[in-house]
Image (cartoon, helix red, strand yellow):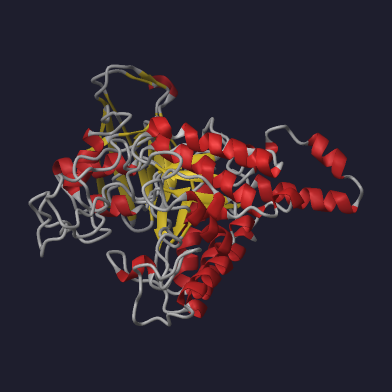
Amino acid sequence: MHSTSRRLSRSITAAACLGLAGSVLAALPASAANDVVDPTSRLFVDWQSSTLEHAAGLEGAARDDALLLASFPAATWITSGTPAEAQAEADRVATAAAAEGAIPTIVVYNLPFRDCAQYSSGGAANTAEYNAWVDGVAAGIGDREAIVVLEPDGLGIIPWYTPAGGSAPEWCQPAELDSATAAADRFTQLNHAVDALTTLPSTSVYLDGTHTGWLGVGDITDRLIKAGVERADGFFLNVSNYEETAKLEYYAGWVSDCLALSTSTAASAAWWDPSFCASQYFPATPGDISTWPLTDAAYDKAFADTGLVRDRANQKHAVLDTSRNGQGPWTAPAGKYSDPEVWCNPPQRGLGRTPTTASTNPVIDAYLWIKVPGESDGQCYRGTGGPLDPERGMQDPPAGQWFAEQAAELIALAQPPISRPTCEVTQTVKTWQGGYLTRVKVRNTGTTTLPDWSLRFALSGDQAVTSSWSADLSRTGDVVTASSPSYRSDLRPGRTASFGFLGTGAPQSESLLFLLDGKPCTVR
């Protein structure tokens, strides 16, 4: 991954000082300017993810589900702690990903009064505390590559905010905050975060763009501009939500277009304002995607009217959260609930597109699992007094805790479908002569022979492998790769391969995540 848009501008600035700008542009490949995230990048699977932490306390099918989900790249959320603690966590993730040649997705989530002190309440106490904390995250990332998702809901829910053209503040009105300064403080905080994170050489930084079922294009564009999007790489959509990918792709293009129109310095576009931007609400009809080309046509006219040229490859880009949108949003039964909370642990949803940086859409940099699938949105009452979720007939786990029933639904209803493991691993670990001995058995439960197989798993940082047998072991960072020996390289269906190794350090706890040729195994 590379932050080409910033690197390109820096190269051109330097070249212009030497009178060489034209030659620099001529030397760049045609696709360089539109690659914010390299489409060949490999996204990072965190071997210390929250999903694996949840799996350690589960059994049976629930643990199998968690381990399957843990095998996919998902975001690491940094949500609290001192600046030093935030720095340490960012450093851990960035270091581990760099060691594997992969790109982590890091969610920065600690704004004062985040989520308006609702289900995901918390955050820094004030602007000074938040700025110091963000600086810690930035120091932890350093010069390593990272996709940074900056403050989910940070622009969708702003304390004491009156939208442009509005006559009164929106619903988030915490009594603890000064109504005269709270909204301005939010933009001050986000602008500082944008500056701290985009100053880094290898980050791609995205601000909250909400989603197609929320703010109109003009409203979110105005907020993005106030938050400093012109200095960031773009915006993210659909975090912790369920909107369909096809709609999000339309919306991403419109927000990118609206930003281009609203921030242009061309004299012909000086009269343009974000409030003029077409959206999913007009001329399109929100619930009828067949009408959404009408909004595309409105942008065609807007560019013509301003004399500007639409260039989505070089406008602001987006990343989409597809962690739970395989079945689209939930429609609550008509008239059943006074507040159906359709965003809160809706039933019968599915995983969406698996994470990738490959995209044929010039505005989309990546499809990511930003919300960690399987973690609860909170305890949903849907307008009742609780404590049960009346739609599920059970008490939902608190926000961020594992929701085994929901995890099972997401896997079963994934669109596109995801495959269950076709391998099985068993392991034994015991102390041995001041260190430890580990034996591993891997069984091919599929129908295809695996030639020259390799099995990847993680050790903790203070452990070292001193010798091994029946497999060739190598280590990169905390991750060990066990490769099949040359004398027995094929693993046929129904057959088991065994190997072992000796290590120093504290006895290794049993690993949970094993990837055989990049695919997860069931752990017994």
Position of 76 with respect to 140 (left or right) is left
Q: Quadrant of residue 120?
A: bottom left
State whether residue 24 is above or below residue 127. Answer: above
Rendering coords of residue 491 (x, y %): 33, 21
Q: In the image as oriented, which residue stretches furthest toward the right? A: 19
Regarding residue 248, the answer to whether it shows in the image is yes
Position of 382 with respect to 357 (left or right) is left
Rendering coords of residue 416 (x, y %): 33, 29
Judging depth in this view, the residue of 222 and 439 nearest the camera is 222
Position of 48 with respect to 268 (left or right) is left
Rendering coords of residue 280 (x, y %): 43, 43
State whether residue 98 is above or below residue 199. Answer: above
Name the quarter where the N terminus is drawn: top right
Q: Which residue: 53% across, 43% down?
A: 254
Name the quarter where the C terminus is drawn: top left
Q: In the image as oriented, which residue stretches furthest toward the left? A: 393
Q: Which residue: 39% across, 33% down?
A: 289
Regarding residue 207, the answer to whether it shows in the image is no
